[in-house]
Image: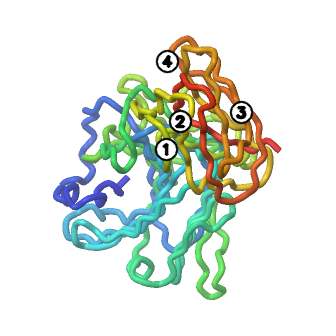
Amino acid sequence: MFTLNRFTGVLFALAAAISFTSPTFAKPYKAAEIVSSQTYKYGRYEMRMQVAKGSGVLSTFFTYKPGSEQAGVFWEEIDIEIFGKNNATQWQSNVIIGTNRPTTKTEGVHTMPYSLGDGYHTYVLEWTPNYIAWFVDGAEVRRITGGQFVTSLTNPQDLRFNLWAASIAEWVGPWSDSILPVYQFVNYIEYKPWVAATNTFGTGWRDDFNSFDTARWSKANWTFAENLADFDPNNVVVKNGTLVLALTKEGQTGYTGTPPVDSGTTPAPSVFIEAETFNEVGGSVTVAGGTVGYIDAGDWFKYNNVNIPQAGTYRVEYKVASALTTAQFTLDKNGVGLGTISVPNTGGWGTYWVIYHDIYLPAGAQNLAIYANSGGFNIDWLKLTKIN
């Protein structure tokens, strides 16, 4: 994926040299990418994907004018990039243009009220002479109408899916190979060309990945500077009507599992919160290693403007650790308790269990807080999933 090449001016000092290197397969990790054999222009691109979770990882679909990475060539690219960090709840829309390096970009980061890695979701990219729009699960998330990011895209582009590990922690999160292997699953892609005479999308084609169509796609065998992995054709697998892109360690390429079944539905809305991302705090809690610890009685930490996607009963899960049997805390909203839960002795301060209780929440922005009724526990994260 080329987005990293324009992440900072420092990276763009690499200019055309960042390019795709020849297939040396010298890196310790192996990624996956497929590239369309033909190029396409205006149209509607729809796909169903379940993406990979994990810090440092990106699951993508994008359009790309071949040769854009070369020095002096006008870059043209449109992106859907799903971050594996933060439980895969965020993704980025982007258009990249320009001859100069760094290029001109219009990055938009979007936070979903659920994990995009817990099931299949429908992504749509609409590219027309007048606008570019991105949709997830039928809802329009972003639209650019007119302007340079629309009018400068004048050439056909190839289509690409890829899964890879990026070397820029401030963008994608810190990398650890302990998460490997991880996978991106694609149920289908459908393309409908733009028909200018009727201002509609016409009849195109659909690939359900019942087999790997070598007339339509090729498998990448290159890499680039910011990719911690080489693209290895062995990490592109089609199985059970699903395209599987794998990110693995060297010597462990391929996929032998069973792809998750696409039920055609969207998973229940959920909200994932890393415990250490609180906005306000009272007391003397300590943040270390991505957890909140040394929580004493009376300590509290608050998360402002938590977006609850739908009104209903939510199962609130907490990943906690304690060496005591007396720890207890309350989840409250604007100072009103929603539910109190006891923390069991998990076997030690570094041994985490997931506990839960069920509460009712209205839709919309909520200010939620954890208040320690009695201390002696650590918390890694909390997750709210609608169950009714």
Label 2 to label 1: alpha-carbon separation: 8 Å
Find out whether the residues at labels 2 and 1 contact each other: C-beta distance under 8 Å: yes
Q: Amino acid at mark 4?
A: Trp
- Location of residue 231 in the rendering, given as x and y in whole percent from the top left corner: 37, 40
Q: Residue furthest right?
A: 388
The residue lying toward the viewer, choosing from 39 and 321, is 321
Pointer 4 or 2: first along the chain: 2
Q: Position of residue 19 (x, y in %)?
A: 25, 54
Of marks 4 and 1, the one in the foreground: 1
Q: Residues within 10 Å of mark 3 (few under 14, many from 20)?
A: some
Name the residue rendered at 76%, 41% in the picture: 359
Of discs 4 and 2, which sits in the foreground?
Answer: 2
Who's the residue at 45% across and 29% down the image? 179
First of labels 3, 2 by sequence position: 2
Vertical relation: 381 (above or below) 138 = above
Residues under labels 1 and 3: Cα distance?
A: 19 Å
* SS at mark 2 in the image: loop
Secondary element under disc 3, as helix, strand or loop, is strand
Q: Which residue is mark 1?
A: 281
Give the numbered dot on residue 299.
2
Is residue 331 in view from this perspective?
Answer: yes
Q: Position of residue 158 (x, y in %)?
A: 44, 62
Between marks 3 and 2 in the image, the one whose residue lies nearer the viewer? 2
Quarter of the picture containing the C terminus is: top right
The quarter holding residue 111 reads bottom right
Please report the residue visible at 30 percent of the width from the left and 29 percent of the height from the top. 28
Q: Can you say whether 130 is above or below 136 in the image?
A: below
Alpha carbons under labels 3 and 2: distance apart: 15 Å
Front-most of residues 370 and 179: 370
Residue topped by disc 4: 349
